[in-house]
Amino acid sequence: MPTIDCDPAAARSRLEEANVRIEAGNTDHERWRAERDGAVAVAYDDKVVVQGSDPTRLTNLLNEGGGRAHVYFDGASRGNPGPGAVGWCLVTSDGVVAEGGERIGRVTNNQAEYAALIRALEAADEYGFDAVDVRGDSELIVKQVRGEWNANDPELREKRVRVRELLERFDRWSLAHVPREINDRADDLANEALDDRN
C-alpha cells in the first residue's frame, strides 16, 4: 500500500487535472478520497495513501508521473496477411502492473508487431512512466525503430514514425530485441486474443 508524503491540496489538483473524481473523506481524519482503475487514494493532513488491486496508475499521478517500466510487446498474424492480434505487458519492480491482448483485424505479421508496440507504449504513457525499457522478439521492428534498417513499406514507415513520437514522451527509453522465451507473456496474450472467437 503506497504512502506518498505530499501536500494533499497539490495532489488533489494533479488528480483533478487528470479527470479523476474527488469525493469527501469518510471520516473526520480524511480530507478527500479518489478512485480510479481499482485503486482508492485517501488524503490525510500530510500524506496520501493508495490502496486497491492496481495502485500504480493513481500513485504515478500523485507523484507527477515517474518510475521505470519494462515494456514487452508481440504481434501475431495467422496467414500473413490474416487475422491479427497484439499482446503487451508492463512490468516494474512490483511485478506486472498492466497487460493486454486484443484482435486487430486482417494484417501482416509486421503490421501486428508495430500495432503491439504502439499499444504497449500508449499504455506505458497512460500509466505515467518516465522511463521505459522496451523489449520485443521482432528483430525487424526493433532495428527499424532504432534506425538500423530501412522501412521500405509506406505503412510500416508511418507506424515507425508513430512509435518514435510515443518514445519521445519518455525522459529515457531503450529498445532491444529479445528471444521469444523472454517475451513469452506478450506472445501468450497475442495468441490468446487471436484464439478468442468471442
Image (cartoon, rainbow, N blue to C red):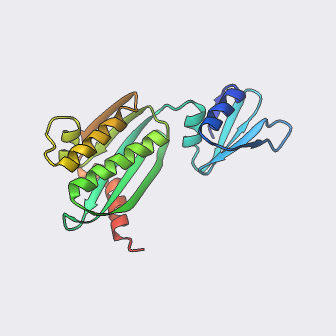
Q: Eyeballing the image, is 25 above or below 101?
A: above
Residue at the far right in the pictured view: 28
Q: Residue at x 57, y 48 (%)?
A: 54
Q: Is residue 65 left or right of residue 26?
A: left
Looking at the rendering, in which quadrant would you find the N terminus?
A: top right
Q: Residue at x 25, y 39 (%)?
A: 176
Picture quadrant where residue 29 is located: top right
Q: Position of residue 30 (x, y in %)?
A: 79, 37
Q: Residue at x 16, y 49 (%)?
A: 153
Picture quadrant where residue 16 is located: top right
Q: Is residue 156 left or right of residue 2?
A: left
Q: Name the foreground residue: 174 vs 162.
A: 162
Q: Position of residue 144 (x, y in %)?
A: 19, 40
Q: Is residue 26 left or right of residue 148?
A: right
Looking at the rendering, in which quadrant would you find the C terminus?
A: bottom left
Q: Is residue 126 left or right of residue 182?
A: right
Q: Residue at x 31, y 52 (%)?
A: 115
Q: Position of residue 132 (x, y in %)?
A: 38, 36
